[in-house]
Amino acid sequence: MGEKAVPLLRRRRVKRSCPSCGPELGGEEKKGRGNPISVQLFPPELVEHIISFLPVRDLVALGQTCRYFHEVCDAEGVWRLICRRLSPRLRDQGSGVRPWKRAAILNYTKGLYFQAFGGRRRCLSKSVAPLLAHGYRRFLPTKDHVFILDYVGTLFFLKNALVSSTLGQMQWKRACRYVVLCRGAKDFASDPRCDTAYRKYLYVLATREQQGMVGTTSSRACDCVEVYLQSSGQRVFKMTFHHSMSFKQIVLVGQETQRALLLLTEEGKIYSLVVNETQLDQPRSYTVQLALRKVSHCLPHLRVACMTSNQSSTLYITEQGGVYFEVHTPGVYRDLFGTLQAFDPLDQQMPLALSLPAKILFCALGYNHLGLVDEFGRIFMQGNNRYGQLGTGDKMDRGEPTQVRYLQRPIALWCGLNHSLVLSQSSDFSKELLGCGCGAGGRLPGWPKGSASFVKLQVKVPLCACALCATRDCLYMLSSHDIEEHTSYRDLPASRVVGTPEPSLGAPQDPGGTARACEEYLSQIHSCQTLQDRMEKMKEIVGWMPLMAAQKDFFWEALDMLQRDVGGGSGPPAPE
């Protein structure tokens, strides 16, 4: 009996122990050793100072042991000390509800990783981390360099970051150096093609202080676009806008001689201007005209949330989750929609609405195919599928958004020339990279022959990877974790899981917005003077409405028949 009672007594003592108060001792042990010292008796400043020397992983693990350590490890004072240790040169902790914790985690998880396509080595390398960077928000690789934008608006220039090894592979240069290209940057863009050889110039949207009227010492902040040479980082051109116009995003579209800059304002309006890149390096000044884009001119009720572009098309996502398209070449239009019925070569800025069942959160745009992710985490693909880049399991083109049913809740989505990549998270919170399409040149590591379905690639993905892109030679992944920005998906209602028909976008989520849009359409038709003008306006409106492709073709054909029968007669008098 005595031999069995001793282990049972030990188990009871361990069960009553607490890491913050120390183990409870028996009566005989208390008499011999005295009262135990509890961590709770220490001053809070001393506990925070001791805990701040722990690595971030151990600090998070310690906060999960008990309620006392959870409160101590979550204090802003602890994270302020950790942030100072991680980034001694950081001058500002940023903004937010928990600024020091957010800053510490951003600087702990920041990283830019790279893997070269082709060859036998399947290693993932990490670039040099700028000490002044406050996390990584965006990055853009060019032919020889890499540009990184942090969360306080500082744009870094990693010079000569990529070199060729003796085996002919691309690798990080260990002695690469970084410089601050500019401060106060909001966004930046370059040639949207996947081939980095075309990225000669870097367009930076920034805020600068401008002097006021002559004779005054006051100054005001104005937005501007600065153009830099990617090879040397030298500024060659600058455009300054009126102080009343505030922009938040910039994208490029078109050829070098007719490069269109699209600027998104804080109010959700799109402005555009055209520059000739072949004349930017010439020491002269000229005037460019800033004009309202047609998507904001014809649809003033829409507020655009974000936009993306490639060489010949632009995609807009509204605040309500709707998607509108601009396609500027007939070949890309045929690949995306399977028809040239609504393509007008004389009016290439006419926006086309995509018919989608739910609100769209983010998207990816390739040369002739695209991917969309809705609020339920579903992935929809559309466009050319010659190499299986849509991931539908076949090689049939899709003229309408088609759901990839076996893949849900992605972290990031990227579409290239003829392949697609998806960054997802497994059940054990580890990240994995999936790809489909053409596998030539090592674009799909582990699948040299390609795949018509999304397959797991042989790439070691960082734990905090949040964005990715690929060029012709390399695969890049950005690592960063922002505690205040994360994609939250909704659970799909039970009525939609089985596959019942779903209403089009707008009716269930925002019926008021749809009603306002219809009223705006009617007012535009009413403003036309003749019946011929009203028929033409109705054709444009059919292209803007979120209808199926077959429905649009039906309405366009019916309007053409009516227009031929009526001729060019004037319309009825406008109602009072």
Image: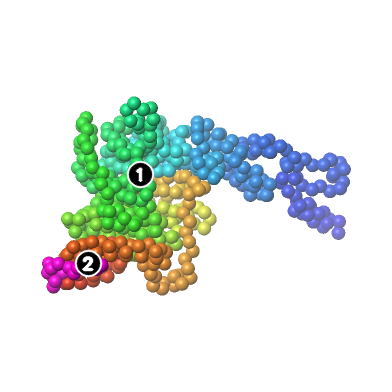
Q: Is residue 519 left or right of residue 51?
A: left
Can residue 165 be seen from the camera position used here?
no
State the image quarter where residue 541 is shown. Answer: bottom left
The residue tagged with tag 1: helix, strand or loop?
strand
Of circles 2 and 1, the one toward us is 2
Q: Residue 330, how many percent across, how many down?
A: 20, 57
Q: Quadrant of the C terminus?
A: bottom left
Q: Is residue 572 left or right of residue 134?
A: left
**Pointer 2: what residue?**
574
Is 461 one of the magenta-colored residues?
Answer: no
Q: Residue 187, how many percent across, how many down?
A: 37, 42
Check residue 504 in the rendering and tell me which mark sits there, or answer none.
none
What secondary structure characterizes most of the magenta part?
loop
Can residue 186 be seen from the camera position used here?
yes
Q: Residue at x 60, y 46 (%)?
A: 60
User: Is residue 82 positioned above or below 411 on the image?
Assistant: above
Sequence-wise, which precedes: disc 2 or disc 1?
1
Front residue of this view, candidates 91 and 405:
91
Query: Number of labelled discs?
Result: 2
The residue tagged with tag 2: helix, strand or loop?
loop
Is 564 one of the magenta-colored residues?
Answer: yes
Q: Residue at x 17, y 55 (%)?
A: 346
Q: Residue 292, how many percent across, how many down?
A: 27, 49
Kind of residue indicated by mark 2: Ala
Front residue of this view, candidates 121 and 128:
128
**Magenta part of the chain:** 563-576
Front residue of this view, candidates 32 and 410:
410
Kind of residue indicated by mark 1: Phe
**Pointer 1: what residue?**
247
